[in-house]
Image (tube, coloured by chain):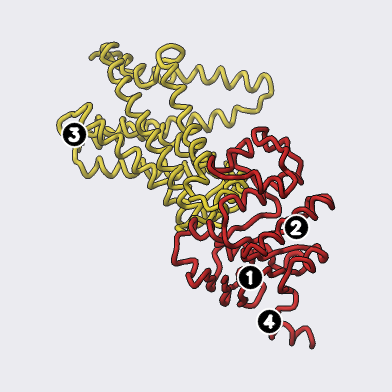
């Protein structure tokens, strides 16, 4: 497992390529150079910080530190999820549903991956748990956010049809079934696309990283395959929990449609 | 017997009244006075304080869907959840007579709902509401989109439902229809808070 270690000089010479990008922006008046600079500085700080934090946590190898970092990752993902929602739930549920879904879907998939599939010793070894959680959170975030968005958009458009079915004596589950199905379908599609083109069109980033770090490509492929399945499981669970939870929130135990629980449109960044 | 007890609709004092089987209560009032909201509250489609009893059973004593199978709200703008009319009915439903009384006997139940005229859809909504024989009908402007002859057919149809012993609450702007069908009338602009009438006088 030997690979060329990168020195600070190497980083600087790579940054030269960014300078080309900046030069193009200046030459053609794209006015992107400031954004480019800020984004790059931000990226360097973020990635370096993660490197140091992970190095520290790996050195501790304490379940408490691992759990702490995992919690932080979940909270950041939850924040990102809320920021992406165009139409949010009112009050506490706005955060509650998204975070609970992320925690549930990512937690189940990640724990299964590190306790049953990869099973390092100890199973909570941060070197395995945290990267898996990171990838799983990424795919869960996409599916949960798509499920909630489809639901919120659809409910506005299909309000009449849903209420007609409820007025006719249908349960909320019967009334919401078409929308629920569509939300889950939409939420699962991106992952399906990623899976079907992985290795053909795109070289998955994780596998690339492992190979660059000196791993045997077939071993890297095995990891990639395992992670794809874990991410698929998490995305599916997330889509189901978010869509179902959303339906429960947007209706009550008298099977009434409760659009009053949806906040007005929020500005999205 | 449908009994409404202190039912709270925003902007109105708590309402109490009864409608017996074979009776039709007409609800009148200007737009925005709460006619539709009152019907929706009785059907338990919106949360509302107060009590609604059907044959002595309060709505909270049974599941929401079960209540709405008995207390049927028919919207002024009926919506459709499936592509064809037929998909909105149970396969066992006997629709021929309902369709014929509303002048829809030639309607192709397998064509897309979107291809029906507004009037056909409104009459079809009445058929849908009656298909499973609910004892209570809450009709919100049931003939608003109908041409005169079809509106007369629909009025006749509703009259028949009242004579057959259904409890009907009717919201309508058509005074002739109200004269013909209603056994009692409730004017929502007449029911005001005592405080409101005092300040209006002052």
The secondary structure type at the circle numbered 1 is: loop
* Disc nearest the viewer among 2 and 3: 2
Q: Is residue A134 left or right of residue A193?
A: left
Q: Is residue B25 above or below residue A188?
A: below
How far is disc 2 from disc 4 in space, using C-alphas? 37 Å
Q: Chain of mark 1?
A: B
Q: Which residue is mark 4?
A: B193
Q: Chain of mark 3?
A: A
Q: Is residue A54 above or below residue B51?
A: above
**What residue is drawn where x is 71% and y is 56%?**
B157
CB under 8 Å between discs 4 and 3: no
How far is disc 2 from disc 3 in space, using C-alphas? 75 Å
The secondary structure type at the circle numbered 3 is: loop
Look at the image and give the colour of chain A: yellow
Horizontal and vertical percent position of residue B69: 53, 56
Look at the image and give the colour of chain B: red
- Label 2 vs 4, first from the N-terminus: 2
How many residues crowd around disc 3 within 10 Å: few (fewer than 14), some, or many (20 or more)? some
- Residue B156 badge: 2
């Amino acid at each position: 497992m030997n690979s060329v270690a990168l020195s600070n000089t190497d980083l600087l010479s790579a940054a030269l390529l960014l300078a080309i990008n900046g030069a193009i922006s200046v030459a053609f008046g794209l006015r992107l150079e400031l954004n480019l600079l800020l984004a790059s500085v931000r990226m360097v700080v973020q990635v370096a910080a993660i490197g140091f934090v992970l190095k520290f946590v790996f050195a501790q190898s304490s379940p408490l530190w691992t759990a702490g970092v995992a919690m932080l990752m979940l909270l950041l993902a939850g924040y990102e999820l809320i920021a992406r929602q165009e139409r949010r739930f009112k009050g506490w549920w706005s955060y509650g549903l998204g975070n609970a879904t992320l925690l549930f879907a990512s937690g189940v998939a990640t724990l299964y991956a590190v306790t049953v599939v990869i099973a390092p010793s100890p199973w909570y070894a941060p070197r395995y748990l945290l990267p898996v959680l990171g990838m799983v959170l990424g795919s869960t975030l996409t599916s949960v956010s798509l499920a909630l968005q489809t639901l919120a958009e659809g409910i506005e458009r299909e309000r009449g049809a849903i209420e007609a079915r409820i007025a006719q004596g249908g349960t909320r589950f019967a009334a919401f079934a078409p929308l629920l199905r569509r939300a889950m379908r939409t939420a699962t599609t991106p992952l399906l696309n990623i899976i079907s083109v992985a290795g053909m069109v795109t070289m998955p980033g994780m596998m690339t990283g492992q190979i660059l770090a000196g791993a045997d490509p077939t071993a890297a492929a095995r990891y990639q395959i395992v992670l794809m399945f874990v991410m698929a499981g998490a995305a599916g669970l997330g889509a189901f929990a978010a869509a179902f939870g959303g339906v429960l929130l947007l209706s009550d135990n008298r099977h009434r449609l409760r659009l009053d629980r949806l906040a007005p449109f929020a500005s999205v960044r | 017997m449908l009994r409404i007890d202190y039912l709270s609709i925003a902007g109105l004092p708590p309402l109490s009244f009864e409608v017996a089987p074979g009776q039709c209560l007409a609800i009148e009032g200007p737009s925005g006075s709460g006619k539709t909201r009152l019907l929706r509250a009785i059907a338990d489609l919106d949360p509302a304080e107060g009590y609604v009893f059907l044959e002595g059973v309060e709505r909270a004593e049974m599941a929401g869907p079960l209540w709405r199978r008995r207390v049927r709200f028919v919207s002024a703008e009926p919506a459709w959840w499936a592509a064809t009319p037929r998909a909105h009915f149970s396969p066992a439903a006997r629709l021929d007579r309902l369709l014929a009384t509303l002048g829809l006997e030639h309607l192709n139940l397998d064509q897309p709902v979107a291809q029906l005229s507004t009037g056909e859809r409104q009459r079809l909504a009445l058929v849908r509401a009656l298909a499973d024989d609910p004892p209570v009908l809450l009709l919100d402007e049931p003939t608003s989109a109908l041409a005169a002859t079809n509106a007369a057919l629909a009025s006749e149809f509703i009259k028949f439902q009242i004579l057959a012993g259904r409890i009907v609450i009717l919201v309508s702007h058509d005074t002739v229809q109200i004269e013909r069908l209603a056994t009692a009338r409730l004017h929502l602009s007449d029911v005001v808070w005592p405080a409101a009438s005092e300040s209006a006088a002052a």
